[in-house]
Image (cartoon, rainbow, N blue to C red):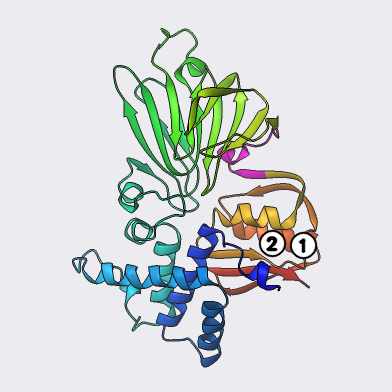
Amino acid sequence: MSDTLALMPRDEQELRKEAVTWYVLLCSGDATDDDKRAWQRWHESHPDHQRAWQRIDAMRDVMQRVPPRLGMPALQPAPKGRRQALRGLLLLASGGALGYAVYRGADGTAPWQLALAEHRTRVGEQRSVELADGSLLVLNTNSAVDIRFSASERTLLLRSGEILIETAHRRHPSAPNDIRPFVVETSHGSVQALGTRFTVRREADETRVIVLEDAVAVRTKHAPERPVILRAGERLAFSATQTGPAQAADDTAAAWRDGSIIVGDWPLGQLIAELDRYRPGRLACDAAVAQLRVSGAFPVADTDKALAVLERSLPVKVNRVTRYWVTVGPL
């Protein structure tokens, strides 16, 4: 790897998972000298790794100040070995409230906002919430939302993750029209419903919108006076300063709502990255097989089954260090 590539910024979510996984392994009591040397190489290979490890140290310091009945045993060396350590990994890497709260995301969201969000889902969990106006909010894996309804507005603050919205007008066409604007806000801007069904996914550097029915108005944080109208069957990504071009959306883009990722001729690496969102720990794809093409429907509630299907249908092998550290590589 060239020096230039080595210094490229790491994806924040992936980085967090790696750091937590290393910490749990080293605290498990089962780490070998080879494990410790491998951690040292990882730690020294990128400045982002060192920054992530400092966050782990900060997390440990904070947890030591938490009352014992609330503390996580995995943040201390685990006398019961790997089983206890991996239980801690499940809590931390899946966005457990205290662990995730201390680990600040790259988008600058305050940790307490994630920990105390009105509605949250864990990694692999989905949840439906009927809102006070009759709209439906569906939270995908590892998501956090606050609701701000008042006499003049209906606003959802998407703190992290992905949601699907079916507005009350769409669900109950005969109901009286609610004139209050319905808006989803992220750190990058806002998405206003125009009588619609749509999804919003918040990433570190951008927010992605897919319109399934009707239309929405997208406004960036720094230019809210210039909305972009996005219509059914379209998608776009926007940052705080600009919107990308509107593109055709896949008809199956919201299949996660029904429990599946449906792909048509995707690179394997892209599918593995999606499955990783629904699985505690670390699921990665070796670069040697990342460009293999794959099509099909894969369950998000049983990622082990999805991996088994890939292993049967492609020249790949699923390598498991533990259930929480899995890599898909060549045979």
69 vs 274, nearest the viewer:
274
Query: Is residue 251 shown in magenta?
Result: yes
The residue that appears at 52% across and 71% down in the rendered structure is 47
Q: Residues within 10 Å of mark 1 (few under 14, many from 20)?
A: few
Neighbourhood count class around disc 2 (C-alpha, 10 Å): few under 14, some 14–19, many 20 upward: few
Report if the CB atoms under discs 2 and 1 are less than 8 Å apart: yes
Residue ID for mark 1: 312
Most distant residue in the bottom direction: 33
Secondary-structure class at tag 1: helix
- Is 158 displayed left or right of 272 in the figure? left
- Residue, disc 2: 308
Which residue is pictured at 55% across the width and 43% down the height? Answer: 206
Residue 48 % position (x, y): 51, 68
Q: Which residues are magenta?
A: 250-261
Residue 205 percent across, percent down from the top left: 54, 47
Of residue 217 and residue 255, the one placed in the foreground of this image is: 217
From this viewpoint, is residue 174 visible?
A: yes
**Left or right of residue 141: residue 27:** left
- Tell how many labels: 2
On screen, 138 above or below 126? Answer: above
The answer to which of 313 and 3 lies nearer the viewer is: 3
Could you tell whether 18 is left or right of 237 in the image? Answer: left
Q: What x and y, as percent, mark residue 249?
A: 69, 33
Tell me the amino acid under the disc marked 2. Answer: Ala
- The circle on residue 160 is none
Secondary element at tag 2: helix
In this rendering, the answer to whether 250 lies above or below 149 is below
